[in-house]
Amino acid sequence: REAVLILFLSGLVSLLLLAVAFLYVLRLLNRTRRLERDAQQAEKLAYIGTLASGLAHEIRNPLNAMNINLQMLEEDLGEAGTDDEPMAILRSSRDEVQRLEQLVKDFLAFARPETTRKVEVLPGDLVADAIRFIRPQFEKADVELDLVREAGAPAISVDPGQLRQALFNILHNALEVSSAGSRVQVRVAATEKGEARIDITDRGPGIAPAQRAKIFEVFYSKKPAGTGLGLPIALRVVESHGGRIDVLSSLGRGSTFSIVLPSALVDFFDENGATGAIEEPGS
């Protein structure tokens, strides 16, 4: 009886092991099929992206020519003393052409991002340089733009041009939601985990919770002249550098977009196996 019981238990254990092995193999097969489908879908999307980029280039060239011709026509009509109404129509047409040209430019940047060329930089220096470039737009809109640099923000390994573009896109959004006389603050600091953090805080209307999950979707925009590509491009750039964008917002009180990037030291080891605050108003 004991021998029969042992044989029975051994057979039962063997069956259980075979069942587990069968389920594991079945899971591997399903995963392999899913990966194959994803690879085929990625190839299709890459092909569509290539076609779309070529089409966008073909559209961009005539738009650029139209913009130049409209500008020359506007100058000629202005010298001839043309009535205000035709001039207003001409300016409106030129503004629309410029908007479409910017849309195509943003689409190209999203569809075919440039190759990343990383160098080690201090985030405070990079942000200060970006602010110097964009400050005239804030001054024209009567919106104050301040920079706060906290001690301890680590150096980061990034493509400066790409990260500046991400900063510009978020700063443009902050400017568009800011009223005259308000303030946008940019703060450079370190996270508790030793990452670099760039906070961009506005005092705009804020973002409703239902919209917050959509703001990084392509072509999603609540602004009449928005392309819906600024934030998706910013997110793609930051994620390509191993970072993320966190968003905090309160209706009626404004929003904070936080770009969080790994330190250059962490990035180096991945590839190869805080006290005080200095405020720089008007900097």
Image (spheres, grey):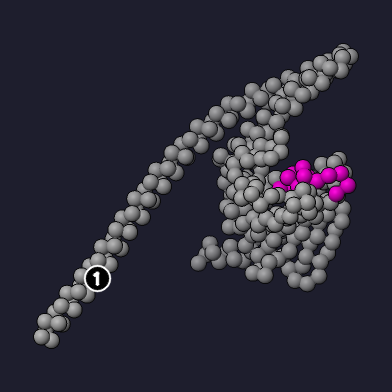
Up-down relation of residue 18 to residue 184 (above or below): below
The amino acid marked with disc number 1 is Leu
Q: Is residue 175 left or right of residue 28?
A: right
**Image location of residue 94, percent across then percent down:** 74, 24
Q: Is residue 56 left or right of residue 225?
A: left
Residue at 53% in and 32% down: 52
Residue at 86% in and 13% down: 82
Q: Which residues are magenta?
A: 170-182
Q: Which image quarter: residue 154?
A: bottom right
Q: Secondary structure at mark 1?
A: helix
Q: Is residue 245 visible?
A: yes
Residue at 46% in and 36% down: 47
Q: Is residue 224 left or right of residue 60?
A: right
- State which quarter of the image contains the C terminus: bottom right
Pick the residue in front: 124 or 217.
217
Q: Which residue is mark 1?
A: 17
Please identify the residue farthest to the bottom as the structure is shown: 2
Up-down relation of residue 19 to residue 207 (above or below): below
**Image location of residue 12, percent across then percent down:** 20, 74
